[in-house]
Structures are given as structure tokens and as C-alpha cells.
Amino acid sequence: MNALSVNVGSVNLKSPLILASGTCNFGRELSEYYDLKILGGISSKGLTIKPRAGNPGVRVAECDSGMLNSVGLQNPGVDYFIENDLDFMRDSGAAVIVNVAGHSYEDYIEMVKKLDPHKDKIDALEINLSCPNVKEGCMTIGSDPSAIRYITSELRKLTDLPIWIKLTPNVTDIKATALAAQAGGADAVVLINTLMGMRIDIRTRRPVLTNNTGGYSGPAVKPVAIRMVAECSQVLDIPIVGCGGIADYKDVIEFMIAGAFAVEVGTACLVHPALPVDLTSDLEKYCEDNKIALKDLTGTLQRW
Amino acid sequence: MSQKQEYKIRLVTKEFLNSDTCYLGFECPGIASSAIPGQFVNISAGTVFLKRPFGIASVDKANGIFYIGVKIVGKGTSEIAKFEPGLTADCLGPLGNGFDFEGYDNIILTGGGTGVFPINFAYETLTSLGKNVTVCEGFRNASQVILNKPGYVLTTDSGDTGIKGTVIAGLDTLEIKDPSNTLVCCVGPIPMMKAVGAWAGGKNMKCLVSMEQRMACGAGICLCCTVKVKDDGPDGYKNVRCCKEGPVFDSREVVW
């Protein structure tokens, strides 16, 4: 029995560690640092119907304990991905999570229609309703519960693949958006994408990012993510994949106690590419020392 | 296929070249033995979140030491400049594609600012290979001149030492005998590299430039450090990663 194995609904993962979308491309570059088969899964770079060049100019601004990015979903397009990257991900030995982004309902529907025929190579679709760096779609849909419910139910009709909805923290009530995803037929929700932020160069009085705003990620956002996972865990029947600021094994434990069934690790890998190697051995040691299977931690939060 | 790794490097030498620029030597045989000119390393810098990229300035393979130059411009570089010998840091490298000198007997190396560090590594490598190397470097004024060697063509904006003007004024003094067998390599500020690329193109010489962009990972996974290059597609350009496809590009491919 593997102490690290977890399930996200019907998806069995040998480890709770999934590389977060947008921080690992399609895994190829990181495979130069370690064997990807130690991972539970890899969530692909956010894909769109057509290739996207992404945003111009400065795309990263360092912050205290994290960073802002405004990459703007640069990606080669779903067709190129299917042709050139999907098999690599499948062969990596980690579960294949395909991150699907769009500008409109039609975009998401078209994307899922293109991906469904390749379902034998895909373990789950992660529907990105939360990218803050594109002008239309994504976060615009993802902040409106009725829009989330609508698009989720439309996608549900098109595929048997597990549908994970990746939600934005840039809302007043995360429970409302998570419940909308569940009502639409989602198999899981992923919490959270980045927090919208801005940094200003006081010399020029211009935003550091050419896109003006960007998404804040890194250890600084972890308490926000933990709170949202814990809140949603109280009201949802579907599993949660936790994401936001994970940098060591204790963060993984914290997310699982809050209610996560698995976690995504992202920004910390930009600083330490082989971080999942350390996380894996530290989690194994934790399970051994505490004589516990990791999945038994999920939702064990003891509230005051 | 795992082959790259994150190193723990140890500072072994440190000297200030002028008031705001220092030259650091780190012990790391893995990097010292494999780096080529134009490649860079990403080094953790005290309390700041992201690593900082530095072009490799020299290697001492026998002792397993590589060198970088650090100009203090912000929090990360000032923290690294405070490192004292014995201190260790996390480091990724060597990263990116270096200069490809293959097929050329004559190399013109030119640059300015912190670009003179990778130029120094290229100079040392090429002279050891017996290539015909000419170096032309430009600085704002005499107080900024660093790593200048006898025989280098020197220019300053102020004219208080060397030729007055930009590196183009220095390059114009060179006699180009065999342009098709001469490669120009430039590392410096964007306007300098753009001007040098145009200068070389005007004389039918290929010019390689080492681009710089704000970088997060250095490993090709975040897509933050993109550079615009020409493309046959509908946009006429595409964004490629400075850290992975670069930092060295053919100047004719860059959308300036």
C-alpha cells in the first residue's frame, strides 16, 4: 500500500502532488531535473483553441514571498498540443490533466470536443475559469456562479472525462462559485488560481507589468487558499484539489487537513525545479513516522 | 533522462571592480566544467523570492570555480554583493544556449555594462582556441570601465578615456577583411545590441546578441522571460523564452 496514494473522485493518483498549470509547461523541461513518474499528475499549460502569443512586455514582478505574472496564456494551441505534447505527458507516468482555457462558452465547448476523442490519454480536464490575465472568458465566466453552472453543464454533456473546475479567488464568496461548479456536474474543483494584484515602479509611476495587473502566487497566498479550501470543504460533496503557495511538505498536509484530496504545486517549482522530489520523500517520512495514509488526512480539520 | 540539477554553490572569492560592481567566484565543478560562453546561472539571493540570472564571466575548470559579475541595481543584486566567502547559495546552471562560434575564424566581441562579463568568458575561450579575436567595449565614463584588457578597443560616452562615442564609434575603427568569415557577438543594453546588429548587417556580417528579459524560473517553465522573434505565421512574430531558446539570438531574428 502506497501511503501517498489518493483519489480525486474516480481519478487515482499515486501521490497527491500535481504540477500546477502554467508553472511546468507540459513537463518536458522538468523531466531534465527529475523523473516525472514520482508525481501524482501534471496539469498542462492552459490551452486555447488557437495558439496565443501571450502578453507583450514585462510579464513578471517579484513580490514579498511570491510573484505577479501576466503571461497571458501563451500556448501553442490545442491541436499542436494533441499532436506534439500529449503523448509526452502520457508517457511521463504521471496522470495527465489537460488545462482548458477560452474566451467564450463556444471556445470551451470546441476545446472539449477536440480533446474528448483522446480520452484514453487524458485523466481529467481542468477547466480554467480563473486566468486573470486575459481580457475575456476565464475569470469573467469564473466570477459568475450562473455562468459557471451553465458552462460546466454544457461540457458535462460532451465528455465522460472527469471535469475539474479551476476557480478564481477573486470573488466575494468562493462557496457560491464552487457550489455552482458542483451543480453543473463537475467532478472536482481546483482552488485557487492566482490573486489579482499590481506593483508600481515608484520612479516611473508605471505598473511594473506591461499588462498593468497580474496574478499573485507563491507562499504569500497560501493562507487565502487554505481558508477557501476549508470553507468549500464544508459545503461540497465533490473533492477539492488544493493549490496556492505550497513550498514544503507541511503545506501539503495543511491543505489536506483543510479538505483537499490532492494538491497542485506551482510557483515554488519556479525557484526549485526539483522540489517535488523533496516533497515526496518528506511526505513518505511523515506518513511513516505518523503511521498514517495521507488520504486519511483529508478534511480532518478540527474547528474551534 | 534526468541530467540537470540544482547545485549548492560556495563563494570562494570576491572583489569589487568599482563602487557598485563586484566579481564573485563560486565553487561548483559541475558548472565550471560544462559552461560555455553566453550561458548563465540563476542564483538564490538571500531573502528575495526569485533567483537572479547572471552571465558566466569566466571558469577555472582545474579548481572547479565559475565567476560572475554583479552590478548592484536592486534588492537581489545588493544581497548577493553582500555575500562573503564561505557562504553557500542555491544555483541552477549552466542555463540557456551560449554563443556558437563554429565556422568562423574571426570573432568581434563587443558589449557594455554587465555585458562585459560574458564577453570576458568568450574572449578567454576563443583565445585558448587560437581564434582571431577583437574586442570593443563601451562604457558611460572612465569610472565605469571594468575588465578592460590591453588591446581592447575602448569607447566612452563622456570621452574621458578611449574613443568618445558608443561602441559603434569603436567598431568603425576596425578593418574588416573577410566579412563572411567574421562573426560579431554583442552583449549589452538593448539599444546597443540593436545598433551593433544593424552595423554588422550593413557590412554583411552575422551578429549574435545575448538578450535580457525579466526572468522568473530560468528553466523554461514559466514563460515570463519571452523575447519577440520573427516568424512566418500570421502575426509575423512569436514569443520565445529568453532562458531556453536564448539568451543568444541571431540579431536578424529579433523583433527590435
Image: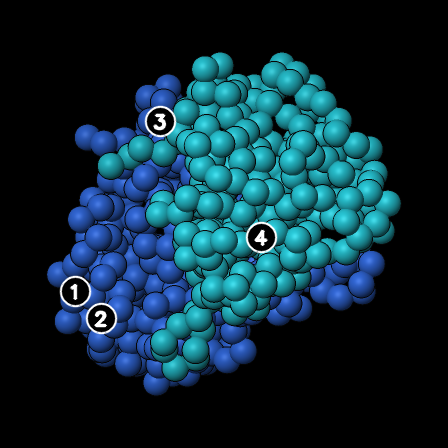
Chain colours: A blue, B cyan
Q: Which residue is mark 4?
A: B175
Looking at this view, is A109 or A289 the one in front? A109
Residue depicted at 80% across the width and 63% down the height: A204
- Amino acid type, callout 3: Ser
Do discs 3 and 1 share a chain? Answer: yes
Tell me, yes or no, whether the two marked residues, 4 and 1, touch with CB atoms within 8 Å.
no
Q: Is residue B162 left or right of residue A208?
A: right
Mark 1: secondary structure = helix
* Pair 4/2: label in front: 4
Is residue B115 shown above or below A121? above
Q: Is residue B57 visible?
A: yes
Residue depicted at 58% across the width and 63% down the height: B199
Q: Residues within 10 Å of mark 1 (few under 14, many from 20)?
A: some
User: Distance between the Cα atoms at labels 2 and 3?
Assistant: 34 Å
Q: Which residue is mark 1?
A: A119
Looking at this view, is A289 or A38 the one in front? A38
Q: Which residue is mark 3?
A: A281
* Pair 4/1: label in front: 4
Looking at this view, is A109 or A259 the one in front? A109
Q: Residues within 10 Å of mark 3 (few under 14, many from 20)?
A: few
Q: Position of residue B79 (x, y in %)?
A: 71, 32
Mark 4: secondary structure = loop
The quarter of the picture where the N terminus of chain B appears is: top left
* Pair 4/3: label in front: 4
- Amino acid type, callout 2: Leu
Q: Which residue is mark 2?
A: A115
- Amino acid type, callout 1: Lys
Marked residue nearer the N-terminal end (3 or 1): 1
Is residue A89 shown above or below A51? above
User: Distance between the Cα atoms at labels 3 and 1?
Assistant: 31 Å
- Amino acid type, callout 4: Glu
Q: Position of residue B196 (x, y in %)?
A: 60, 59
